[in-house]
Image (cartoon, rainbow, N blue to C red):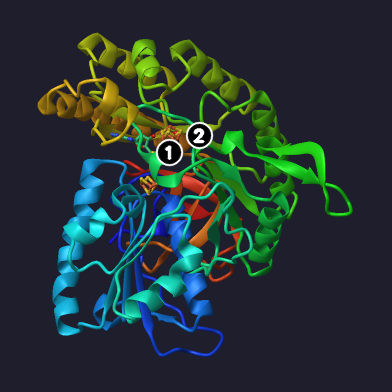
Amino acid sequence: MLDLLHTTKTHDETRQGEALDMVPTGASNGRKLYIESYGCQMNFSDSEIVASILIDRGFETTKDFKDADVVFINTCSIRENAEQRVRNRLKEFESAKARNPGMIVGVLGCMAERLKAKFLEEEKLVDVVVGPDAYRDLPNLIEQVDDGAKAVNVLLSREETYADISPVRLNSNGVAAFISIMRGCDNMCSFCVVPFTRGRERSRDPQSIVQEAKNLFEAGYREVTLLGQNVDSYKHAQKNEDGSESAATVNFATLLAMVAEVNPLLRVRFSTSHPKDITDEVLHTIARYENICNYIHLPVQSGNSRILDIMNRTYDREWYIDRVDAIRRIIPGCAISTDVITGFCTETEEEHQDTISMMEYVKYDFAYMFAYSERPGTLAAKRFEDDVPEEVKKRRLTEIVALQRTHGHERIQDYVGKVHRVLIEGLSKRSDQHYCGRNDQNAMLVFPLDARYKAGDYVDVLGESCTSATLIGKIIN
Ligand code: SAH
Ligand code: SF4
Ligand code: F3S
């Protein structure tokens, strides 16, 4: 099990098993909920909403599924192996259900949305299938199962943002939290299943976002990450003083500034930026506020314009390079990370080399890299043949992973000998004699404990040495 709070991963379905543990504030119903999440940060954030809805109805949460009355698995469909992992995990729930036939097993999230009622036929132990926009219906669906039925709600919504539900911050270090600012996606990248599993894009009311950030700050949190599939297309009608909607809209740059102004001690991060939408206005806002972190996740997918075109990414190589240049110009020292897919339909060796040269150009601080996995129902599955052989996809992947390892290492070596403002997140995973925390650029630092400071404090740390991905240093203030 990986620790959500000690990883910079944004889109890796390998994170798993974040089990939540909390007791209800109101009357207990004596039932225990276990919930485990896969996929992107949106899913982890959604699980906090689900837990909130059920704790409100008297459920307690448990970290042990064998001990649970209701077992939920919040799933991801992004690649074939993400779905396979969920199916394997469901098998592990079978023996627990055999011992406790009253146990309810529910599948939530993107796989639930993709497979709908078919899930009930394919996996007999599943009692409930619930899509990402139907979590308010969970108490009702559980009742239906209590009455002996199987229950499904996979309706997608154009409005649902769960804005009024305050997520329970479980499994948290009490320092960093996610805030969902929008849901769904209106881009139609041809490889991607998300528009089908998450529905239309909609932005959450900015006032509720700012309020959530304020509440977190007051509860001692010092970092928020604003989440959306494409944060740069955030757009919400501004409210007039009397609460009515005005003609003006709040865009992402304005929202970033609003959240940054909650408190200078609150660090603001965000993910994911789409290269077609990230504006100079957003970059200037990042540069203007000390507490908006100098780190941008800007997925490139491919460095070749023909591939980008058939991926329907709606930018080309030159456009992407222009955005990277703008970041370097407006926010000097800004870290950039990316996502890359190797072996997309018809990708040639030369086109793969364009991805390599793009990586050489940007020298990403971090990258999430994947071999293309065809997803049923996507535009690519309908239009193009998945014709790059598996071993070629894998070989290209190995090449870019090796290249990225060198770039990542070079970046972190650059930080040695420099002083970094670090927000202490807690004890290091490897040693209870060390703290860990990140610098502005999202690099992880590890440094010896110091009784003067605790999690949530800012310290200046001198980078003294590094491993492949972590800086090792000491507090100097
Ligand atoms: N909204 C984000 C991406 C979310 S999915 C964006 O537009 O950047 C996270 C990453 O998974 C994508 O950036 C892509 O690199 C990868 N991915 C998505 N579909 C995939 C597929 N079918 N095969 C392999 N990788 C995929
Ligand atoms: Fe998928 Fe593209 Fe939307 Fe990202 S922007 S979620 S890759 S469709
Ligand atoms: Fe996976 Fe759904 Fe996120 S498919 S990556 S959990 S939006």
Image quadrant holding the N terminus, namely bottom left
Residue type highlighted by circle 2? Asp
Residue 419 in sight from this viewpoint: no
- Percent x, y of residue 197: 39, 45
Q: Earlier in the sequence, mark 1 or mark 2?
A: 2
Q: Residues within 10 Å of mark 1 (few under 14, many from 20)?
A: some
CA gap between label 1 and label 2 equals 6 Å
Label for residue 195? Answer: 1
The reply, left or right, for residue 263 in relation to residue 301 is right
Give the residue pinned by disc 2. Answer: 186
Instruction: For the C terminus, give its image quadrant.
Output: bottom right
Query: Furthest residue to the right?
Result: 242
Determine if the C-beta at disc 2 is less than 8 A from ligand 2.
yes
Q: Is residue 323 above or below residue 201?
A: above
Considering only vertical position in the picture, is 184 above or below 210?
above
What is the crowding at mark 2: few (fewer than 14 residues within 10 Å), some, or many (at least 20)?
some
Q: Is mark 1 within 8 Å of ligand 2?
A: yes
Q: How many numbered markers are drawn?
A: 2
Closer to us: 367 or 254: 254
Mark 1 vs 2: CB contact within 8 A: yes
Circle 1 sits in a helix, a strand or a loop, which is it? helix
Q: Which residue is at a point 64% across and 43% down the rendered structure image? A: 292
Task: For mark 2, give the secondary structure.
Answer: loop
